[in-house]
Image: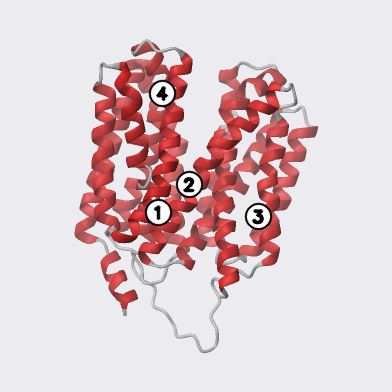
Amino acid sequence: MTNRDRIGLTWISFLSYALTGAVVIVTGMVLENIAEYFHLPVAQMSNTFTFLNAGILAAVFLNAWLMEIIPLKRQLIFGFVLMVLAVLGLITSHSLSVFSLCMFVLGVVSGITMSIGTFLITHLYEDRQRGSRLLFTDSFFSMAGTIFPIIAAAILARSLPWYWVYVCIGVIYVAIFVLTLCFQFPQLGKKTPNQPMIEKEKWGIGVLFLSVAALCYILGQLGFISWVPQYATKDRGMDLAQAGGLVGTFWTSYMIGMWAFSAILRFFDPQRIVTVLALLSTALMYWFVRCNDAAMLKGIMMSLGFCSSAIYTTIITLGSLQTRISSPRLVNFILTCGTVGTMLTFVVTGPIVDKGGPHAALMTANGLYAVVFVMCLLLGFVSKHKQRGLVSAH
């Protein structure tokens, strides 16, 4: 593979995360306008966005096998066709069923591109460089989460139809499509005549620890951040603008943290640093939930966003290092576990809030972060990533 192809494929990975971030994070911005468009209550309309998460989960899960059957370039070209059809469906249809189908298709497209983008980074880069590249790639998710709500607000403020937000998101896939046509992709599932047979490696119990950590981290993070606004307004007496500022502070600090750790991770063992970060994040979240001084909450949230930013991508990096050759199935399995955490967010936290209020949901999220710390700690006794690093050194 030429250096030109490596750079092009890396940019496809960056944009794949930006696409998923844009699709997922603009939901809250356009929800009320879409509810008015279909003449439905906001609570009822929000249920249809489950189709979006279901599409992401299905695509990430199935692509663990499809990547070895269908060439990556062909998948991305097909994804472009699906993206165009989904956006056209949103523009032209007034049917709730068609809208739900389009949301599912958008989820499938996002899941395909994100799983391919993640695999490309793990395939193109080795060891600690892989971790730093994954972190920088993941920062494009947060970057899109910062930029596209601004774009959505500008579109809606000018009384333009809500579906123009998704047209703008589609521009990201236009860039992915153009890059896809210009560069060569690695071939999976094909062996050259002179290529020796490679014995399939067992994943080991470390992958189980990493999968549990990925699920608990995403479920804990989204469960926490989803209920912070209600906790801040109902339990801490803040107004809505202040509560929204807490969430904004978290994501801004999260993005800065990913940029910082993309450089820092090159010099540290990934298992040790993710264990320390999980411990710090658990302690900071506990401090946030227990803190009675509203003025302190913003500073705690800033620290929490920074410290927790590197956890998920480092978990994926460690997963990819559990075998000598990066396995797309292994990487996608851990991604799938994280996506299951997304799907379970309101299924788990909704009943908890009904019984114990937002504070109970935050305490549950804190407990899930503690589980992440325990899993990362246990991983240190069984992880194969150090053996993997020694092999690469030779």
The image position of residue 63, as x and y in percent, is 54, 57
Name the residue furthest right: 92
The total number of labels drawn is 4
Q: Earlier in the sequence, mark 3 or mark 2?
A: 2
- Cα gap from disc 4 to disc 3, whole angstroms: 34 Å
> Mark number for residue 314?
none
Residue in the image at 46% along x and 56% along y = 332
Badge 2 vs badge 1, beta-carbon distance below 8 Å: yes
Residue named by callout 3: 176
Q: Amino acid at mark 1?
A: Ser
Residue in the image at 73% along x and 40% along y = 87
Residue in the image at 52% along x and 54% along y = 115
The image position of residue 351, as x and y in percent, is 39, 22
Badge 1 vs badge 3, beta-carbon distance below 8 Å: no
Q: On screen, 279 above or below 126?
A: above
Q: Earlier in the sequence, mark 1 or mark 4?
A: 4
Q: Is residue 321 left or right of residue 121?
A: left
The image position of residue 270, as x and y in percent, is 30, 57
> Mark number for residue 262?
1
Q: On screen, 9 above or below 23?
A: below
Q: Quadrant of residue 229?
A: top left
Residue named by callout 2: 139
Circle 3 or circle 2, nearest the eye: 2
> Mark number for residue 227?
4
Q: On screen, 82 above or below 349?
A: below
Badge 4 vs badge 3, beta-carbon distance below 8 Å: no
Circle 1 or circle 4, nearest the eye: 1
Q: Earlier in the sequence, mark 2 or mark 4?
A: 2
Tell me the element at label 1: helix
- Cα gap from disc 2 to disc 4, whole angstroms: 23 Å
Q: Quadrant of residue 232?
A: top left
